[in-house]
Image (cartoon, coloured by chain):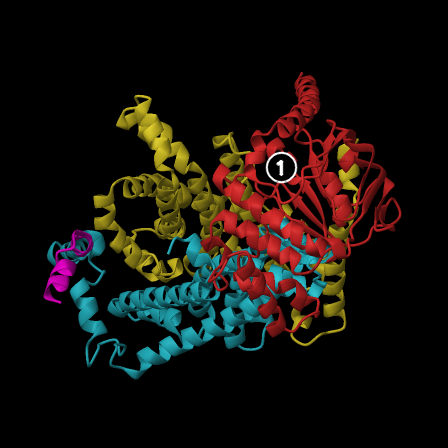
């Protein structure tokens, strides 16, 4: 009953109204031929395009390809980035040696790696995995380092005085203590990763949502460009939600973050 | 007691005030039929178990929140009822529990904020008045510092000055000295008492600290647990300015026993109510 | 003086940093120039990159002694500045009002939420198609990327302001305009600047993508051209150039933030 009242309150209504107004404005802009925007498709055409797409196998194939690329690159970034970040956060000496190199490479925009990646990796697919990896890797490492340094010294002391060995401190204090930052890094990294993937697919990819959108452009199938954009948005949203959900599962002591 | 004798304003009259919070059907009666009077120029201290609705009352008087029924009058003027709620203004000044000095303004910018923003004084005038006030209470040389560079005791004093420069009728303080250590507290008590003796305003002071309540107030209002009502009013007739050795006198100890008994009864009820809610 | 110099030279942190970088460059050299490992055959060695980067007569025609190098930089910096500036002005303004006015927030936030998950780079085809000229398309893509990061962080900034500051301001006799200037704007600044840092990073990334796909000049375009013309030395030197520019721009934002938020220095314990 209370949930019902929540759904129909004034704020949800305003949100709904704003979306309706947005679509109406879109329709109007195309209809009265506002300069430049007149090239946009009508909302209706996009809807038809979306229905067509949903019925075709190749469209869902594109989803699959993009999602696989994201997950491979993203998970690799976690597998390599989290231990590296932990090591850099724990050992001052290790950080002194590695951090400068890291800082030297970090400001290079991930997309600028595209030519080098294509050159280096034997297959296109591998170079795309690598680019997605680069997109998430630096953010993950930075966040893990920050997470470790945010753990207060008193917690470590308390643990030692309770008889914890270094191994225990690592697994029971440092890892869970830096978890919130790790999750933040994953959330931000996921956003960047999609960006990189779309660019990589448009430039170098075979298949995938980004490539599909680009091909719609080269075929002048304008409604399908918009369908592609929306699909990419939905896919990105799905991945971010997944990361957030994982974060909530991994950190039951934090209700919200 | 020179300025006090001249003209006192800020009589508060709280009549049958009830406040029910009802967000999404959770019916919480914070205050029920609460009535009491504070005469102009009185130092009223409100004590009671935590969560009993003291701050609710403060919000109603300050104009931050509405009330469900009843009325609040300030010098005979209706400032809060079910239908009418006068917006916050400079007559009713609040000093907040955790401090609300603007961290991005210097001490001087904070103190002169009120008069300048109300266009009551030119900036230069306000600066002169503020410097004089800071000087009087011995806070020299901090006017260009940012609040977070100062101790919390100094921050609280500056915040009280920021309120007083507006010459309010009522100053409301919501546990302003919570979290200060005992030494800092005594400094604050003397500071507040001196200020009170010099300015013709009413004080509405919320606290948990019974010593503080009796030492500062001439009227101690003890509230019941939720829904809040007045449990007992104790008049403290000790003359101002009060000295700290009073804390050991017989008359003080008798007062304290009286207040303590009333508060303890309510605290026990609150505790049991809490247990019930948990169960 | 000499002892200070000595202290700097023998500082273990600096020494380790240099060692770290040397190891990295050494491995790179070893893999490419000495061992000539299979996958590294096409990758130029660090020496080759440096030679080309600082050559008076570079094979690629692009080194620090050529006009075209600075022209590329000027194009990219100009586009980024235009997009970032516009995104900051519009994004901060919109974010402040959205955070401040519940009604505006309710009406606009669902739209922002719908448009935000779309990666800015997915706009590329549509932007090229409907906007007049490649230049505007590239700037628009860069703008869109920076804009959402700025709006969202500004809204968060307004939400982060302690409610008591608003109440105190009202008590002290502020009109809404005064609350906006004295509470909303300064109170949200720390978050705004975090947002600007992020938005600058995304802006550079999107710029490179935009230039690769649609551009006619600029660092990103030159990198891709270098790839096609087999001038891999300048692909790498341009990557580092982009890195340096990105680093400088984010340092500038940090410095500006520190200047505008003098009150924060005590919180940082300076």
Instruction: Locate the C terminus of chain B by quadrant.
Output: top right
Q: Is residue C16 magenta?
A: yes
Question: Going by the image, does A124 lie left or right of B221?
Answer: left
Q: Whole-percent x and y of residue B199?
A: 68, 55
Residue C17: % across, % down: 20, 54
Tell me the residue that label 1 is attached to. B215
Q: Which chain is drawn using red?
A: B
In this view, the residue in front, C251 or C142, is C251
Q: Nearer the viewer, residue A77 or B81?
A: B81
Q: Is residue B209 left or right of residue B154?
A: right
Residue positioned 51% across, 57% down in the render: B138
User: Where is residue C95 shown, x and y percent of the image?
Assistant: 61, 60
Q: Is residue B91 left or right of residue C28?
A: right
Q: B174 and A180: which one is in front? A: B174
Residue A5: x and y in percent read 79, 37
Q: Secondary structure at mark 1?
A: helix
């Amino acid at each position: 009953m209370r949930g019902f009242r929540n759904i129909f309150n004034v704020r949800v209504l305003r949100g709904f109204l704003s979306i309706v107004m947005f679509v109406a404005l879109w329709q109007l802009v195309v209809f009265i031929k506002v300069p430049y925007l007149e090239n946009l498709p009508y909302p209706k055409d996009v809807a038809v395009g979306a229905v067509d797409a949903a019925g075709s196998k190749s469209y869902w194939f594109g989803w699959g390809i993009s999602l696989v690329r994201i997950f491979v690159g993203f998970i690799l970034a976690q597998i390599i980035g989290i231990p590296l970040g932990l090591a850099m956060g724990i050992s001052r000496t290790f950080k002194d040696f590695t951090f400068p190199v890291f800082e030297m490479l970090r400001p290079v925009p991930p997309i600028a790696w595209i030519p080098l990646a294509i050159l280096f990796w034997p297959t296109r697919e591998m170079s795309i995995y690598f680019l997605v990896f680069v997109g998430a890797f630096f953010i993950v490492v930075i966040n893990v380092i920050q997470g470790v340094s945010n753990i207060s010294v008193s917690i470590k002391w308390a643990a030692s005085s309770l008889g914890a060995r270094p191994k225990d401190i690592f697994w029971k204090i440092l890892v869970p203590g830096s978890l919130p930052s790790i999750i933040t890094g994953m959330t931000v990294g996921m956003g960047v990763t999609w960006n990189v993937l779309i660019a990589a697919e448009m430039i170098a990819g075979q298949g995938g949502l980004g490539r599909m959108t680009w091909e719609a452009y080269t075929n002048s199938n304008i409604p399908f460009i918009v369908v592609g954009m929306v699909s990419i948005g939905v896919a990105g949203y799905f991945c971010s939600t997944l990361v957030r959900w994982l974060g909530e599962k991994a950190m039951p002591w934090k209700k919200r973050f | 007691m020179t300025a006090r004798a001249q003209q006192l304003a800020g009589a508060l009259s709280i009549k049958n005030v009830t406040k029910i919070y009802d967000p999404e059907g959770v019916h919480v009666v914070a205050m029920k039929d609460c009535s009491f009077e504070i005469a102009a120029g009185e130092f009223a201290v409100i004590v009671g178990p935590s969560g009993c609705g003291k701050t609710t009352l403060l919000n109603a008087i300050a104009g931050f929140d509405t009330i469900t029924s009843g009325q609040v009058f300030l010098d005979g003027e209706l400032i809060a009822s079910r239908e009418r709620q006068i917006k916050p203004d400079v007559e009713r000044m609040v000093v907040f529990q955790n401090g609300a000095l603007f961290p991005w303004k210097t001490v001087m910018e904070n103190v002169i904020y009120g008069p300048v923003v109300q266009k009551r004084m030119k900036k230069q005038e306000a600066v002169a008045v503020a410097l004089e006030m800071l000087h009087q209470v011995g806070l020299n040389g901090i006017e260009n510092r940012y609040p977070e560079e100062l101790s919390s005791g100094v921050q609280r004093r500056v915040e009280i000055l920021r309120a007083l420069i507006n010459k309010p009728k009522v100053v409301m303080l919501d546990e302003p000295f919570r979290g200060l250590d005992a030494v800092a507290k005594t400094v604050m008590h003397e500071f507040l008492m001196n200020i009170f003796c010099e300015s013709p305003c009413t004080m509405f002071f919320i606290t948990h600290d019974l010593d503080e309540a009796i030492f500062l107030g001439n009227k101690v209002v003890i509230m019941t647990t939720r829904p809040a009502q007045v449990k007992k009013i104790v008049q403290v007739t000790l003359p101002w300015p009060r000295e700290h050795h009073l804390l050991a006198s017989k008359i003080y100890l008798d007062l304290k026993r009286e207040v303590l008994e009333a508060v303890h009864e309510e605290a026990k009820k609150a505790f049991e109510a809490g247990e019930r809610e948990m169960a | 003086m000499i002892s200070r110099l000595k202290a700097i030279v023998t500082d273990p942190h600096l020494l380790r940093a240099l060692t770290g970088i040397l190891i990295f460059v050494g491995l790179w050299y070893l893999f490419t120039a000495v061992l000539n490992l299979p996958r590294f055959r096409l990758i130029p060695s660090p020496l080759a990159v440096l030679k080309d980067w600082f050559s008076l007569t570079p094979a690629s025609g692009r080194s620090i002694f050529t006009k075209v190098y600075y022209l590329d930089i000027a194009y990219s910096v100009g586009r980024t500045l235009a997009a970032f500036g516009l995104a900051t002005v519009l994004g901060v303004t919109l974010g402040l009002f959205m955070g401040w006015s519940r009604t505006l927030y309710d009406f606009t936030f669902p739209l922002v939420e719908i448009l935000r998950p779309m990666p800015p780079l997915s706009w590329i085809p549509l932007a090229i198609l409907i906007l007049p000229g490649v230049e505007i398309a590239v700037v628009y893509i860069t703008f869109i990327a920076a804009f959402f990061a700025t709006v969202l962080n500004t809204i968060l900034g307004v939400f982060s302001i302690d409610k008591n500051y608003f109440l105190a301001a009202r008590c002290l006799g502020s009109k809404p305009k005064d609350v906006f200037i004295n509470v909303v704007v300064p109170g949200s600044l720390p978050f705004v600047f975090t947002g600007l840092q992020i938005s600058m990073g995304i802006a550079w990334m999107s710029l490179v993508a935009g230039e690769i796909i649609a551009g006619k000049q600029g660092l990103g375009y030159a990198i891709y051209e270098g790839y096609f013309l087999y001038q891999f030395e300048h692909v790498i030197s341009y990557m580092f150039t982009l890195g340096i520019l990105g680093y400088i721009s984010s340092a500038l934002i940090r410095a500006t933030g520190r200047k505008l938020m003098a009150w924060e220095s005590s919180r940082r314990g300076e």
